[in-house]
């Protein structure tokens, strides 16, 4: 899953980006409202973590403009502690949730995962489909017999995206957009390599290929 983190504090922004990457997300970092608004319009993010106190354009203005244009990307806003006015204004502008500064990274991750699961109609907790479970905390795949498999960062992001979008036709380009960060080399052909690795673990029947179109996870075909 791919996130946009918008934070003008360079130190905090870098720390949060590293923590979110460690948690298995591809993360792009923006430090001002103008750049953030543009990125949110042209890039297919799964969620945006948006600070409200931004230079050049406020977070509320950025969020409001996205919603006016029909951009419904899930947004978690960062607010100053005790500023209930900001929280109310954020929800009115179209925010999905908020976290007050200062905060613990575990709280931020819990709220991010909750929003993502709501937006994909998935239940909270570890992601389960048929006989496999993806442990988001350890980034391990658990099979029906209890055997755990460690996954690389890319394998984890790819499988999580598959499991949150079951029975949907996903093209290589769409998967690439949601698995890699903005400045990474996005070679869609590499997706085939990771899909084959996952098939070796979970079985080929769970990820079907539609020739010339992409992949379907959990198809009954």
Image (cartoon, grey):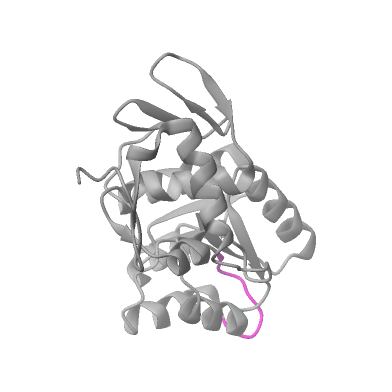
Q: Is residue 13 left or right of residue 195?
A: right
Along the viewing direction, whichever of 209 and 146 lies nearer the viewer: 209
Furthest residue toward right: 11
Residue 152 visible here: yes
Q: Is residue 37 magenta?
A: no
Q: Residue at x 38, y 62 (%)?
A: 88
Taking the image as shown, residue 146 lies to the left or right of residue 8, namely: left
Q: Residue at x 31, y 51 (%)?
A: 120
Does residue 108 appear in the picture of this structure? no
Furthest toward the front, the residue is: 211
Is 45 rendered above or below residue 101?
Answer: below
Give how far across and how far down residue 91 sits, in percent.
36, 63
Front-lying residue, 219 or 122? 219
State whether residue 183 is above or below residue 193: below
Q: Position of residue 218 (x, y in %)?
A: 29, 42
In terms of image quadrants, where is residue 113? top left
Q: Which of the two residues, 190 or 14, is positioned nearer the viewer here?
A: 190
Q: Is residue 39 above or below residue 91?
A: below
Verify whether residue 54 appears in magenta: yes
Q: Please state the extent of the stretch shown in magenta in the rendering.
A: 50-57
Task: From the top left corner, tell me how far across and down residue 61 is, in percent.
Answer: 47, 80
Image position of 30 with respect to 55: above or below: above
Residue at image coords 38%, 28%: 132
| Image location (x, y in percent) of residue 158 | 50, 49
Overall secondary structure of the magenta section: loop
């Amino acid at each position: 899953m791919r996130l946009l983190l918008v934070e003008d504090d360079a130190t905090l922004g870098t720390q949060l980006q590293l923590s979110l990457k460690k948690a298995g997300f591809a993360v792009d970092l923006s430090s001002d409202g103008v750049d953030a608004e543009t990125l949110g319009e042209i890039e297919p993010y799964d969620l945006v973590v948006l600070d409200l106190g931004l230079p050049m354009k406020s977070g509320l203005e950025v969020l409001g403009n996205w919603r006016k244009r029909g951009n419904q990307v899930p947004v978690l806003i960062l607010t100053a502690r005790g500023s209930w006015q900001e929280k109310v204004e954020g929800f009115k502008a179209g925010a999905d949730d908020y976290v007050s500064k200062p905060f613990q990274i575990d709280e931020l991750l819990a709220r991010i995962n909750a929003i993502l699961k709501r937006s994909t109609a998935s239940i909270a907790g570890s992601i389960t489909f048929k006989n496999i479970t993806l442990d988001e905390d350890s980034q391990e795949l658990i099979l029906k017999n209890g055997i755990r498999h460690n996954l690389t960062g890319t394998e984890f992001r790819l499988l999580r995206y598959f499991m949150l979008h079951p029975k949907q036709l996903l093209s290589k380009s769409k998967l690439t957009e949601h698995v890699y960060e903005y400045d990474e080399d996005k070679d869609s052909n590499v997706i085939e390599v990771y899909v084959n690795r996952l098939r070796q673990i979970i079985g080929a029947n769970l990820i079907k290929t539609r020739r010339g179109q992409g992949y379907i996870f959990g198809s009954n075909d």
